[in-house]
Amino acid sequence: MNRIKQKLQEDKKILSIYFTAGYPQLNDTVKIIQDLEKNGVDLIEIGLPFSDPLADGPTIQESSTIALKNGMHTELLFEQLKDIRETVSIPLIIMGYFNPVFQYGVEAFCQKCQEIGIDGLILPDLPLDVYQEEYEPIFKKYGLINVFLITPQTSEARVRAIDKASDGFIYMVSSASTTGAKSGFGAEQTQYFNRIASMELNNPQIVGFGISNSETFDQATKNTKGAIIGSAFIKHLTQNGVEQIGDFVNQIR
């Protein structure tokens, strides 16, 4: 069974952490993954930096820019991760934009992911219909879960279509803005969380965008399976380097 599915079956709220590969330093990737698992993180999203990250807020954009300047690219990420399963057992997802995957070759990319032990992909700019028409058989061939995003503006019909096409969890974007830490969720987000919960979808939801501390983690996971923290963790890396990862995770839960 795919590690993502196994993790989702556990009776706990999932804490997922996103970071940008190659940031702060080019060769920090593996150490960050290992330390996150060691400190109790349930799932890791490894950001593949891209030069035009439209959905990302300033913190993640800046980390992508620096990672690219450091020399990070797709082939190097695969090289860094080639032995990751010797030391790490939790689910790993690569998150990025479709262009680098397309340039690498979709099947070659998916095959490489299977070889090194990647469990899924999050590609926000890969449309559902294009995925289903052109790429779904390739993802399934290599045992990869494709994670789709929904937002407060996503219609019920589309949410249900995404639920039907999903085979792991649904990435529930908390707001229509770009990524970034927030101090809390307002009435609009709470209403959205409740609306999706009332739909009783087949796939669990994990909330992303705006999770930065234990308060927002608890708010986001009241009616969902888990939450994703990205910008706040990257800010922590910027300020503290890779030596105090445990301090960050411990303040979340």
Image (cartoon, helix red, strand yellow):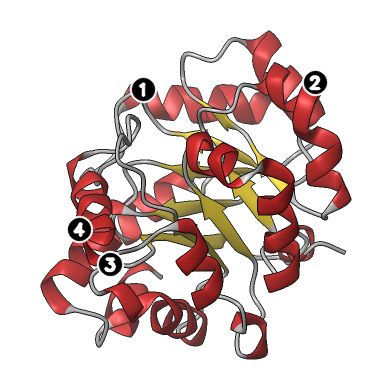
Q: Pinpoint residue 120: horizontal percent, then vertical percent.
A: 67, 53
The amino acid on which the numbered mark 2 sits, given as a three-letter code, is Glu
In this figure, which residue is indicated by the disc labeled 2?
A: 133
Q: Amino acid at mark 4?
A: Ile
Chain-order first, disc 4 or disc 1: 4
Residue at left 68%, top 42%?
A: 106
Q: Which residue is mark 3?
A: 23
Query: Residue 195: where, in percent of width, then height?
Result: 57, 22
Using the numbered discs, state the Cα–Cα distance from disc 2 to disc 1 in whole angstroms.
27 Å
Cβ–Cβ below 8 Å for labels 1 and 3? no
Left or right for 212, reference 6: left
Q: Tell me the crowding category of disc 4: few under 14, some 14 to 19, or many 20 or more residues within 10 angstroms, Cα based.
A: some
Residue drawn at x 41%, y 58% as measured from the top left? 73
Give me the disc on residue 135. Answer: none
Q: Using the numbered discs, state the Cα–Cα distance from disc 3 to disc 4 in whole angstroms.
A: 7 Å
Name the amino acid type tagged 1: Ala
- Residue 116 lies, in percent from the top left, at 68, 72
Q: Left of 212 or right of it: where is 229?
A: right
- Of 98 and 108, nearer the camera is 108
Q: Quadrant of residue 170?
A: top right
Q: Which residue is mark 4?
A: 66
Callout 3 amino acid:
Tyr
Residue 179 appears left or right of 37: left
- Would residue 200 be visible to someone looking at this image? no
Sequence order check: which comes first, mark 3 or mark 4? 3
| Residue on which disc 1 sits | 176
Where does the N terminus fall, quadrant-wise? Answer: bottom right
